[in-house]
Amino acid sequence: MAQNVRPKILIADSYKSHTETLSAYMKELTPAIEVYSAPEGREALSETAARDIHLFLVNGFLKGPLNGFELCRAIRRLDAHQHTPIIMVLSGHLMSYHERGLHAGADLFLHQPVEKQELWRMMVLLLNEYSQRRRRETSAADTQDLEFIEIKPFVRILH
């Protein structure tokens, strides 16, 4: 029998203010998520190993031994996270950054400063797709569905 699981999101960002802002935006969307953070790549990989992460937000310009692009590649090399969604947060709009991010394994991109509604739209899209993929790939008895996230009725998401 399927059971609901609270979505677990890991924010990998060297700047505490960015992490706090993104976390607050996510909690405003729904309190039914668990948000974890890591200020550098190695710590993000440790958190990934310790928890069943369902979505990653990675700053492309993460400080430390692993930058955000290298962290994306490392996440994709983990068997359990080959298909886990990754949103890469970039400071610039250069196509070369997008190309690097795509080659590293990012699914979608956000740009600083992050727009709250754009973050919400991407989170809902990726978490619901991830939940559907997991449901298809596992037997009905073993399925753990992520709690479905719906946008608050008073929030208009821009397309």
Image (cartoon, rainbow, N blue to C red):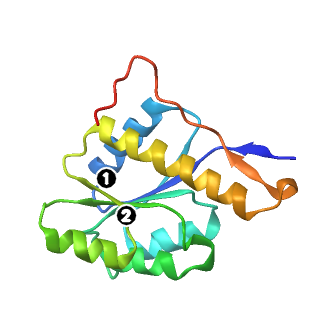
The image quadrant of residue 68 is: bottom left
Name the residue tied to disc 1. Answer: 16
**Residue 39 tag number:** 2
Q: Position of residue 76 (x, y in %)?
A: 49, 77
Q: Residue 138: give x, y in percent of width and height.
A: 77, 62
For image coordinates 40% across by 73% down, the residue present is: 105
Say which amino acid is labelled 2: Pro
Q: Horizontal placement of 140 versus 23: left or right?
A: right
Q: Quadrant of the C terminus?
A: top left
Who is closer to the viewer here, 34 or 38? 34
Element class at badge 1 = helix
Relative to 33, does residue 144 appear above or below in the rendering? below
Where 80 sits versus 110, above or below? below
How far across and down, in percent of the image, does residue 119 sit? 35, 43
- Residue drawn at 63 percent across, 62 percent down: 51
Q: Horizontally, is 56 left or right of 156 in the view?
A: right
Verify CB contact (< 8 Å) between mark 1 and mark 2: yes
Q: Quadrant of residue 50?
A: bottom right
Tell me the residue at 45%/19% (across/down).
153
Residue positioned 64% across, 44% down in the render: 6
Q: Nearer the viewer, residue 101 or 68?
A: 101
